[in-house]
Image (tube, rainbow, N blue to C red):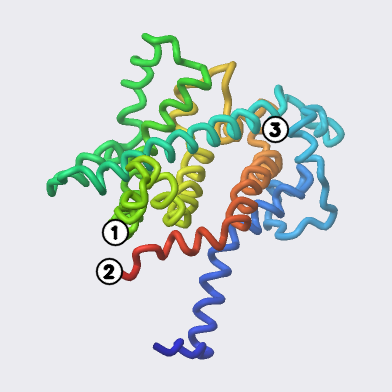
Amino acid sequence: MQNRPLTPLLALVLAAALAVTLFPVFWVVMTSLKPPTDWNAAPAIWVPSEPTLANFRTLFDPSALEAYGLSGVSQPATPAILGSLLAAVLATLLSIAIGLASAIGLSRYAKLSKWTPLVILSGRMFPPAAIAVPFVIMFSAVNLIDSYAGLIAIYVAVTLPFSTWMLKSFVDDLPREIEQAAMLDGRSRLMAHLLVTIPLIKGGVFATTMFIFILNWSEFMFALVLSYTSVTTIPVQLAKYVTATAGTLYGVQAALAVLAMLPLILAGYAIQGHLARGMTFGAVKR
């Protein structure tokens, strides 16, 4: 099958789509470099004439904006950055580990009915606001409110349906004969899966890991209702940059948003080969 030639019209459509997609990123980056006088300027200032790093400094030194006559930033963003990193990484690893074991079990050893997909994915069919209150009540009873253990537990619970079903699709596309050949060579079922199944679907595992990490890294609702003072994350911290004198600190919010994007960009670049393979794994059926 030959590639479709890039016509001028198609190039124009792709350029327009790229511009629309990247404009929010451009605007956030530019806002993070604007001094406070440019945040609410009318007409809007697209590119600051005097860019500043004061917004980024404010994330770690709340007094950095006092040079512009602004005050009221009460706490640095360091605890939120570290909290998001800890919760997202641990929750992603647990979700992938449990989801991978479940995916192999469902794909290889379970007799599934037509209702199985509905049962597995039913946990994601409700909006977070609908299930947040029951979780708050349960976690209050076992003293998991405002703790990393509670936050990680809820992250695992809400992402496990995704990780299980996505990984199951990759395992389904792997011929059983490969595992059977390993067992004929003397491997146990467990070792056949560890040494054969998982390495052969590593592209799918990496792709699923990236997807789950993005969900955990950007989650807001559960982090808001389950954390108070001891635990905080970047999405919750973004909502705190509002002062009585200056209102919403758009530049500081944009600076934190830029820092929040960096792990996703770096991780995506580092595993782009595996990610591309994982997203197309199973596109051609046996």
| Residue on which disc 1 sits | 177
Q: Under tag 1, what secondary structure?
A: helix
- Mark 2 and mark 1 in contact? Answer it, CB < 8 Å: no
Marks 1, 3: nearer the viewer:
1
Q: Viewer-proximal residue, 114 or 185?
A: 185
Identified by mark 2, the residue type is Arg
- Mark 1 and mark 3 in contact? Answer it, CB < 8 Å: no
Precedes in sequence: disc 3 or disc 2: 3
Tell me where residue 211 appears, x and y as whole percent.
Answer: 46, 49
Q: Viewer-proximal residue, 99 or 235?
A: 99
Q: Residue at x 48, y 46 (%)?
A: 209
| Residue on which disc 3 sits | 246
- Is 148 drawn above or below residue 90 in the view shown? above
Direction from residue 117 to residue 220 in the image, left or right: right
Q: Give the spatial CA distance, label 2 vs label 1.
A: 13 Å
Precedes in sequence: disc 1 or disc 3: 1
Q: Residue at x 34, y 64 (%)?
A: 282
- Is 211 drawn above or below residue 7 in the view shown? above
